Amino acid sequence: MKLKVCGLSNQIEVQTCINNNVDFCGFILNYPKSHRYISFEKVKKLLSIEKNKTQYVGVLVEPSLEELSKFSKLNLDYFQLYGKYDDSSLKEIKEKFGKKIITTIQVKSKNDIRAYKNIERVSDIILWDSTGYEKSLSWNHYWIKDIKIKGEKMIAGNITKDKLSDLSKLADIVDVSGALETNKVKDIKKIEDFVTHVKKINNEN
Protein backbone atom coordinates (compact mmCIF):
# COMPACT_ATOMS: atom_id res chain seq x y z
CA MET A 1 0.00 0.00 0.00
CA LYS A 2 1.36 3.38 -1.06
CA LEU A 3 0.69 6.67 0.70
CA LYS A 4 -0.22 10.11 -0.60
CA VAL A 5 -0.15 13.00 1.85
CA CYS A 6 -2.25 15.83 0.45
CA GLY A 7 -2.61 19.53 1.16
CA LEU A 8 1.01 20.28 2.06
CA SER A 9 1.81 23.94 2.47
CA ASN A 10 5.30 24.49 3.85
CA GLN A 11 8.86 23.24 3.64
CA ILE A 12 8.98 21.22 6.86
CA GLU A 13 5.85 19.27 5.86
CA VAL A 14 7.25 18.44 2.42
CA GLN A 15 10.69 17.57 3.79
CA THR A 16 9.15 15.33 6.46
CA CYS A 17 7.25 13.40 3.76
CA ILE A 18 10.37 13.02 1.60
CA ASN A 19 12.53 11.96 4.57
CA ASN A 20 9.93 9.32 5.42
CA ASN A 21 9.66 8.03 1.83
CA VAL A 22 6.03 9.05 1.35
CA ASP A 23 5.11 8.00 -2.20
CA PHE A 24 3.13 11.11 -3.22
CA CYS A 25 3.01 14.71 -1.97
CA GLY A 26 -0.13 16.63 -2.96
CA PHE A 27 -0.54 20.40 -3.35
CA ILE A 28 -3.84 22.28 -3.74
CA LEU A 29 -3.26 24.59 -6.69
CA ASN A 30 -6.49 26.30 -7.76
CA TYR A 31 -9.09 25.89 -5.03
CA PRO A 32 -8.87 28.89 -2.65
CA LYS A 33 -11.93 27.69 -0.67
CA SER A 34 -9.67 25.09 0.90
CA HIS A 35 -7.55 25.99 3.93
CA ARG A 36 -4.84 23.90 2.24
CA TYR A 37 -4.66 26.07 -0.88
CA ILE A 38 -1.29 27.68 -1.62
CA SER A 39 -0.22 30.36 -4.10
CA PHE A 40 1.61 29.67 -7.35
CA GLU A 41 4.82 31.28 -6.06
CA LYS A 42 4.73 29.26 -2.85
CA VAL A 43 4.12 25.95 -4.56
CA LYS A 44 6.89 26.71 -7.07
CA LYS A 45 9.28 27.11 -4.16
CA LEU A 46 8.13 23.91 -2.45
CA LEU A 47 8.47 21.93 -5.67
CA SER A 48 12.14 22.92 -5.87
CA ILE A 49 12.85 20.71 -2.82
CA GLU A 50 14.85 17.63 -3.86
CA LYS A 51 12.24 14.89 -3.78
CA ASN A 52 14.22 11.63 -4.11
CA LYS A 53 11.63 8.95 -4.99
CA THR A 54 8.59 10.93 -3.85
CA GLN A 55 6.21 12.04 -6.62
CA TYR A 56 4.72 15.54 -6.69
CA VAL A 57 0.99 15.87 -7.41
CA GLY A 58 -0.86 19.07 -8.36
CA VAL A 59 -4.51 18.95 -7.29
CA LEU A 60 -6.81 20.87 -9.64
CA VAL A 61 -10.56 21.40 -9.39
CA GLU A 62 -12.19 21.86 -12.81
CA PRO A 63 -9.11 23.64 -14.17
CA SER A 64 -9.25 25.85 -17.25
CA LEU A 65 -6.82 25.28 -20.13
CA GLU A 66 -4.96 28.41 -18.98
CA GLU A 67 -4.52 26.92 -15.52
CA LEU A 68 -3.38 23.58 -16.90
CA SER A 69 -0.85 25.38 -19.06
CA LYS A 70 0.39 27.52 -16.16
CA PHE A 71 0.75 24.60 -13.74
CA SER A 72 2.28 22.27 -16.34
CA LYS A 73 5.42 24.39 -16.14
CA LEU A 74 5.92 23.36 -12.50
CA ASN A 75 7.98 20.39 -11.33
CA LEU A 76 4.92 18.14 -11.00
CA ASP A 77 4.75 14.44 -11.85
CA TYR A 78 0.95 14.23 -11.83
CA PHE A 79 -2.13 16.36 -12.33
CA GLN A 80 -4.93 15.19 -10.01
CA LEU A 81 -8.14 16.31 -11.67
CA TYR A 82 -11.59 16.93 -10.22
CA GLY A 83 -14.30 17.49 -12.82
CA LYS A 84 -16.14 15.79 -15.67
CA TYR A 85 -13.66 13.90 -17.85
CA ASP A 86 -13.59 10.96 -20.20
CA ASP A 87 -10.74 9.08 -21.89
CA SER A 88 -10.77 11.44 -24.85
CA SER A 89 -10.44 14.69 -22.84
CA LEU A 90 -7.82 13.10 -20.55
CA LYS A 91 -5.75 11.95 -23.54
CA GLU A 92 -5.77 15.52 -24.84
CA ILE A 93 -4.58 16.91 -21.48
CA LYS A 94 -1.91 14.25 -21.13
CA GLU A 95 -0.50 14.80 -24.61
CA LYS A 96 -0.66 18.58 -24.43
CA PHE A 97 0.82 19.09 -20.97
CA GLY A 98 3.04 16.03 -20.48
CA LYS A 99 1.85 15.04 -17.00
CA LYS A 100 0.62 11.72 -15.69
CA ILE A 101 -3.02 11.81 -14.63
CA ILE A 102 -4.87 10.95 -11.43
CA THR A 103 -8.57 11.20 -12.27
CA THR A 104 -10.99 11.65 -9.38
CA ILE A 105 -14.43 10.11 -9.03
CA GLN A 106 -16.48 11.75 -6.29
CA VAL A 107 -18.64 9.16 -4.59
CA LYS A 108 -22.00 9.86 -3.02
CA SER A 109 -23.83 6.62 -3.87
CA LYS A 110 -22.75 3.17 -5.01
CA ASN A 111 -23.71 4.01 -8.60
CA ASP A 112 -21.00 6.70 -8.73
CA ILE A 113 -18.32 4.01 -8.46
CA ARG A 114 -18.99 2.83 -12.03
CA ALA A 115 -17.85 6.14 -13.54
CA TYR A 116 -14.36 4.64 -13.76
CA LYS A 117 -15.37 2.95 -17.02
CA ASN A 118 -15.21 6.32 -18.83
CA ILE A 119 -11.66 7.14 -17.68
CA GLU A 120 -9.81 3.87 -17.11
CA ARG A 121 -7.97 3.69 -20.45
CA VAL A 122 -6.05 6.93 -20.00
CA SER A 123 -5.87 7.53 -16.21
CA ASP A 124 -2.60 6.39 -14.61
CA ILE A 125 -4.37 6.32 -11.25
CA ILE A 126 -8.10 6.49 -10.48
CA LEU A 127 -9.00 8.10 -7.16
CA TRP A 128 -12.34 7.41 -5.53
CA ASP A 129 -12.99 10.28 -3.11
CA SER A 130 -15.89 11.76 -1.17
CA THR A 131 -17.86 14.75 -2.44
CA GLY A 132 -16.42 16.92 0.34
CA TYR A 133 -13.42 18.52 -1.43
CA GLU A 134 -11.63 20.15 1.55
CA LYS A 135 -13.89 18.31 4.05
CA SER A 136 -12.96 14.71 4.84
CA LEU A 137 -16.31 13.00 4.39
CA SER A 138 -16.84 9.26 4.76
CA TRP A 139 -18.22 6.85 2.16
CA ASN A 140 -18.26 3.08 1.89
CA HIS A 141 -14.79 2.20 0.61
CA TYR A 142 -15.83 -1.46 0.23
CA TRP A 143 -17.81 -0.47 -2.86
CA ILE A 144 -14.58 -0.58 -4.90
CA LYS A 145 -13.45 -3.97 -3.58
CA ASP A 146 -14.10 -5.99 -6.74
CA ILE A 147 -13.15 -3.35 -9.28
CA LYS A 148 -10.15 -4.20 -11.44
CA ILE A 149 -8.49 -1.52 -13.55
CA LYS A 150 -5.39 -1.19 -15.70
CA GLY A 151 -3.78 1.47 -13.49
CA GLU A 152 -3.66 1.86 -9.72
CA LYS A 153 -6.62 2.35 -7.39
CA MET A 154 -6.45 5.19 -4.87
CA ILE A 155 -8.97 6.03 -2.15
CA ALA A 156 -9.61 9.13 -0.06
CA GLY A 157 -12.34 10.35 2.26
CA ASN A 158 -11.91 10.41 6.03
CA ILE A 159 -9.08 7.87 6.09
CA THR A 160 -7.70 7.27 9.55
CA LYS A 161 -5.04 4.96 10.99
CA ASP A 162 -7.52 2.44 12.36
CA LYS A 163 -8.95 1.83 8.86
CA LEU A 164 -5.62 1.16 7.15
CA SER A 165 -5.44 -2.59 7.63
CA ASP A 166 -8.79 -3.08 5.86
CA LEU A 167 -8.09 -0.45 3.21
CA SER A 168 -4.84 -2.17 2.21
CA LYS A 169 -7.01 -4.97 0.79
CA LEU A 170 -9.11 -2.56 -1.28
CA ALA A 171 -6.71 -0.11 -2.93
CA ASP A 172 -3.10 0.37 -3.99
CA ILE A 173 -2.83 3.89 -2.56
CA VAL A 174 -4.43 5.78 0.33
CA ASP A 175 -4.77 9.56 0.10
CA VAL A 176 -4.75 11.28 3.48
CA SER A 177 -5.04 14.87 4.62
CA GLY A 178 -7.43 15.73 7.46
CA ALA A 179 -6.25 12.88 9.71
CA LEU A 180 -2.77 14.43 9.67
CA GLU A 181 -3.85 17.85 10.89
CA THR A 182 -4.28 19.57 14.22
CA ASN A 183 -6.47 22.67 14.05
CA LYS A 184 -6.36 22.55 10.23
CA VAL A 185 -2.55 22.57 10.14
CA LYS A 186 -0.43 19.56 9.19
CA ASP A 187 1.02 17.96 12.31
CA ILE A 188 4.53 16.57 11.76
CA LYS A 189 4.15 13.98 14.49
CA LYS A 190 0.88 12.75 12.97
CA ILE A 191 2.54 12.43 9.55
CA GLU A 192 5.43 10.41 10.97
CA ASP A 193 3.08 8.25 13.02
CA PHE A 194 0.86 7.56 10.01
CA VAL A 195 3.84 6.60 7.83
CA THR A 196 5.06 4.20 10.53
CA HIS A 197 1.61 2.61 10.63
CA VAL A 198 1.52 2.16 6.82
CA LYS A 199 4.97 0.54 6.86
CA LYS A 200 3.89 -1.80 9.66
CA ILE A 201 0.85 -2.96 7.69
CA ASN A 202 2.94 -3.41 4.53
CA ASN A 203 5.40 -5.57 6.46
CA GLU A 204 2.56 -7.71 7.80
CA ASN A 205 1.02 -8.31 4.36
Image (tube, rainbow, N blue to C red):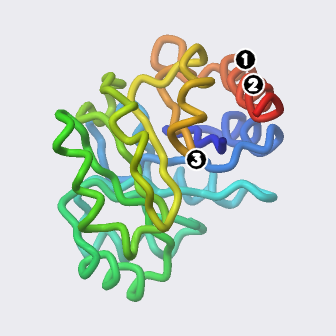
The mark closer to the camera, 3 or 1, is 3
Q: Of callouts 2 and 3, which one flags the residue occurring earlier in the amino acid sequence?
A: 3
Sort mark 3 into few (<14), some (14-19) or many (20+) by Cα contacts within 10 Å. Answer: some
Alpha carbons under labels 2 and 3: distance apart: 20 Å
Q: Residue 111: x percent and y percent?
A: 16, 43
Question: Alpha-carbon distance for marks 3 and 1?
Answer: 24 Å
> Whole-Å distance between the Cαs marked 2 and 1?
5 Å
Amino acid bearing label 3: Asp
Q: Secondary structure at mark 3?
A: loop
Secondary structure at badge 1 equals helix
Q: Does residue 9 appear left or right of residue 61 in this picture?
A: right
- 116 left or right of 36 in image: left
Q: Secondary structure at mark 2?
A: helix
Mark 2 crowd level (few <14, some 14–19, many ≥20, 10 Å Cα)? some
The reply to whether the C-beta atoms of the residues labelled 2 and 1 are less than 8 Å apart is: yes
Q: Residue at x 50, y 64 (%)?
A: 151
Query: Callout 1, which amino acid?
Result: Lys
Which residue in the protein does label 2 denote?
192
- Residue 156 horizontal side relative to residue 113, left or right: right
- N-terminal of the pair, mark 3 or mark 1, is 3
Circle 1 is placed at which residue position?
Answer: 189
Q: Nearer the viewer, residue 114 or 97?
A: 114
**Pick the front one: 93 or 166:** 166
Which picture quadrant has residue 141?
top left
The residue sitting at 66% across, 18% down in the picture is 190
- Residue at 68%, 42% (x, y): give it: 14
